[in-house]
Image (spheres, coloured by chain):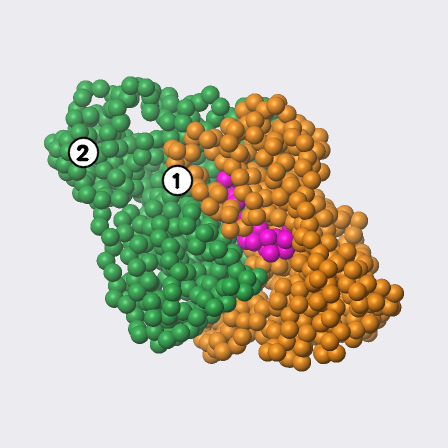
Chain colours: A green, B orange
């Protein structure tokens, strides 16, 4: 058995059974091993950002890592942006990156690059396998790193001769590293903060936004009267009817400051002290008001369901009926011009039960949550690292993790461009994805940000850098180019009709909403 | 004046007057300065790989750097692959990468990343500007680094507060660093090698493949009887009728070894000792046969025209009429099925005089040179770092560097996918580009490489990773989606008709050749 096969067998033994791939010559022995050995599904992406963004979303839903297969430094480079997003999401991914044969590197052939240097900024664990007999054990270490809570980016670099050289066999799977300990003191401190009789807020992140932990948050809010918030972006938040509503902190600095202005006690479970997305001249970076005390109950890497249960116990809230449970109460179906509220209302009516919503709506989708809490129950996933070009790729990964659920991607036209090739993978794998492109033909967010940073009003050269018009991208043509059925909407009635059609079918469909 | 404006004025003073941009919030003050100050043309790319690939090709034709404008670490990440190609091409580029305001970085907001860490593997010069008063001087240093022969990747990281803070004014432009010295000893050694009476070859690279240097190579070949070769890939090689024909070394290891088997003296001018693109089990990495002596006359960073003149002088070849001058002798226009020879013949007939050919044909285009030497005179540009996804972006940069010449992009369908968004920039800027996509619906090169590395025959999982079919991408639809006119050819007659139409018009047109 060669090194490549020993690695494939180790991955399978470690419960990694999906590989998002964009291979090249240096990975051919790994491709051959994937071919020969039954047990790993291989999904091709026509661009590496598709591969890494899909792996991020897959982890969030499947709760276990997929592997990627990337072609040397430049292939990894193309995946960097969505690895950045995945790292911020604390997703677990096992990157297999091919490298020249070890003896070939010194010759500085065209594709030679500092792969470890490129990997480090977007990885929690990086190793170049030294020889074919080490590859299996290194693979087991990589999976361990990827699975260690809450998840990590493990990048294993595989010189071609370590793949084709002789190996002894697969390595035994390694358990994930330990979770962060929950501190009884921190729980007592948190409880004191919520009971201090001052305006208090509980800021939740990570797994505290799902399942029993989320329900417990509602009990604690009912018991203590604290407000509930989630961070602006969340890897996966359960929302909709029957779930405890935890509104996201807003993107806008002024709105965030206003929302937290009266807070005297801010208690964190799985969340970090809230900071602004960007810095703006004359505005603070931290959203915590002066005089507000911040208490961390548990880190995102801890068992947050366990932490929330202990927290509720400390507060005597274990049996308190949860507050803020959302009713199923979609608004009347609207009509006319596609306003942001109108789009929110249509979507709230149509989100299928148990859908996975992938949110990269940027400008258009930013405040959908106020509406969609009254939709059917669903998971809501946000882009965690702020690097646009995640949503279509994430749609691929979510749909592969949960083929029986509908994945519903809310996209901006600017963002969708970066990993547009994901549409082809949706078509090839016949993924159960509906894509809504809100086509405002601009980097609309930047038109606001231009003002927000105090740069005044954009003139013609600036406008040209902030718009996607002349020509308007034709999303129907692009979707068809990749083999995905598509339809266009220009009114809310058309949006309703197109989305209904898309959400009812099994397979990919793209709706372009012209705004 | 703020830091951003001081930088824009410094760039203009340094003769940088084109900016390929994909900005975000942290770059808004730089965008505002570009808006306010006359002198830099701004070209938007919808993906950063378009931006960096365009800057690479721009340098090769304009012989001066453009700037890029990229959004923090992930924006740079998306540009990494084509920066890798540019670095291997020794192109000069001034990357301006936005960063959070210096005081904001410690808060680890979503977009926070190790930008310098990502930049270093693909840059020759990296600096984070410390404050707004340093930005102008740092900009001048960046241009100096980019212009220092043969060219360098300079990455200047600009925290937002250094852009919006007060500056004193622009910095004075700095001259490029010195060229590498030409050694009289090396020239004498090279001359001795060619006169040793043994089978000798002159391997040329960089600027030795253009203008007077190329002509002199023909004189030297006539005088000494040496063979002429260029490296497998070349940043820019003049070719076609009236030019000295310098065939490229082949991609195939066996063909390369066979071609050089009898060589006893290998003399390098602007080229490196030839190595294989990849390593293959049981095959050598270096293409130089045993017993062959390698002599370097001049490095790629030297003044190669001057070096070649001195070399010819040493050899008494200054007035020798050049050998291997290609005649204008296109083959008869072929017809029928699109074979590789047939495609070569059509192209050889149609390359417009003084065209810039951007070659990312990978499998289909690999041996076109044997035919196109008999086409009208043209420049031929290859992808230098082996990271596919360069050609369409390079087409944008070449066309902006030489708007009065026709840019003719030869693309594989697999390669074209990575920076497909370049088509939109071609449409928006109405660039004078013809794109030929050879659509074999596969990573055809990899189907060969699978065998070459000894991995046997691909089974169904491997085949799925090596093909782009199911569904076949529809390039006509994709082109139209980006606003580019397009036509399809399935025979050589149709190819002739479509290409004729495309090459005769002014503006972008894409031809999909279904193979």
Magenta includes B342? Answer: no
Image quarter of residue A171: bottom left
Residue furthest front in the image: B185
B403 is higher (above) or lower (below) than B137: below
**Residue B380 visible in the snapshot:** no
A304 is higher (above) or lower (below) than A116: above
**Residue at the image point whose x is 35% and y is 53% from the top:** A125
Image quarter of residue B95: top right
Query: Is the stretch drawn in magenta largely helix, strand or loop?
Result: helix
**Residue at the image point whose x is 48% and y is 47% from the top:** B118
* Residue B71 percent location from the top left of the image: 52, 39
Magenta includes B75? Answer: yes
**Residue at the image point whose x is 30% and y is 65% from the top:** A137
**Residue at the image point whose x is 51% and y is 74% from the top:** B280
Judge from the rendering whether residue A139 lies leftward or rightward of residue A496; answer left or right. Answer: left
Per the image, the residue denoted by label 1 is: A349
Q: In which chain is the residue bearing label 1?
A: A
Magenta range: B66-91
A290 is higher (above) or lower (below) than B49: above
């Amino acid at each position: 058995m060669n090194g490549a096969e020993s690695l494939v067998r180790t991955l399978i033994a470690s419960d990694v059974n999906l590989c998002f791939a964009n291979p090249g010559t240096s990975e051919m022995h790994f491709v051959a091993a994937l071919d020969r050995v039954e047990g790993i599904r291989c999904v091709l992406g026509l661009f590496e950002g598709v591969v890494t963004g899909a792996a991020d979303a897959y982890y969030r839903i499947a709760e276990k890592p997929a592997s990627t297969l990337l072609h040397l430094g430049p292939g990894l480079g193309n995946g960097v942006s969505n690895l950045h997003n995945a790292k911020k999401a604390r997703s677990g991914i096992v990157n297999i990156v091919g490298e020249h044969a070890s003896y070939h590197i010194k010759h500085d052939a065209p594709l030679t690059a500092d792969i470890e240097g490129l990997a480090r900024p977007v990885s929690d664990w990086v190793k170049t396998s030294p020889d074919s007999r080490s590859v299996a054990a290194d693979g087991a270490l990589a999976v361990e790193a990827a699975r260690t809570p809450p998840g990590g980016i493990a990048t294993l670099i595989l010189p071609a001769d370590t793949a084709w050289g002789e190996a002894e066999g697969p390595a035994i799977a390694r358990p994930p590293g330990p979770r962060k300990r929950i501190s009884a003191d921190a729980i007592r401190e948190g409880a004191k903060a919520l009971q201090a009789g001052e305006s208090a807020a509980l800021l939740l992140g990570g797994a505290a936004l799902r399942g029993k932990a989320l329900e417990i948050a509602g009990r604690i809010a009912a018991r203590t009267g604290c407000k509930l918030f989630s961070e602006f972006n969340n890897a996966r938040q359960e929302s909709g009817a029957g779930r405890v509503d935890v509104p996201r902190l807003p993107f806008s600095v002024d709105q965030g400051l206003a929302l937290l202005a009266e807070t005297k006690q801010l208690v964190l479970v799985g969340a970090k002290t809230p900071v602004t997305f960007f810095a703006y001249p004359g505005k603070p970076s931290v959203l915590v008001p002066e005089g507000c005390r911040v208490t961390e109950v548990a880190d995102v890497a801890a068992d947050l369901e366990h932490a929330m249960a202990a927290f509720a116990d400390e507060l005597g809230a274990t049996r308190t009926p949860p507050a803020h449970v959302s009713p199923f109460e979609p608004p009347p179906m609207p009509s006319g011009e596609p306003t942001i509220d109108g789009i929110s209302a249509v979507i709230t009516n149509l989100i299928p039960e148990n859908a996975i919503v992938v949110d990269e709506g940027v400008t258009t989708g930013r405040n959908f949550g106020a509406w969609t809490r009254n939709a059917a129950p669903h998971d809501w996933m946000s882009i965690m690292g702020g690097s646009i070009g995640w949503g279509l790729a994430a749609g691929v990964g979510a749909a592969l993790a949960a083929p029986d659920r509908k994945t519903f991607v809310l996209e901006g036209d600017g963002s969708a461009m970066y990993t547009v090739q994901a549409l082809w993978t949706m078509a090839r794998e016949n993924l159960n994805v509906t894509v809504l492109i809100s086509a405002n033909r601009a980097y609309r967010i930047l038109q606001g940000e231009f003002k927000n940073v105090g740069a005044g009003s954009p003139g013609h050269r600036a406008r040209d850098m902030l718009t996607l018009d002349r020509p308007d991208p034709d999303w129907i043509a692009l979707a068809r180019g990749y083999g995905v059925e598509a339809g266009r909407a220009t009114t809310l009635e058309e949006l309703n009709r197109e989305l209904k059609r898309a959400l009812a079918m099994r397979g990919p469909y793209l709706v372009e909403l012209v705004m």
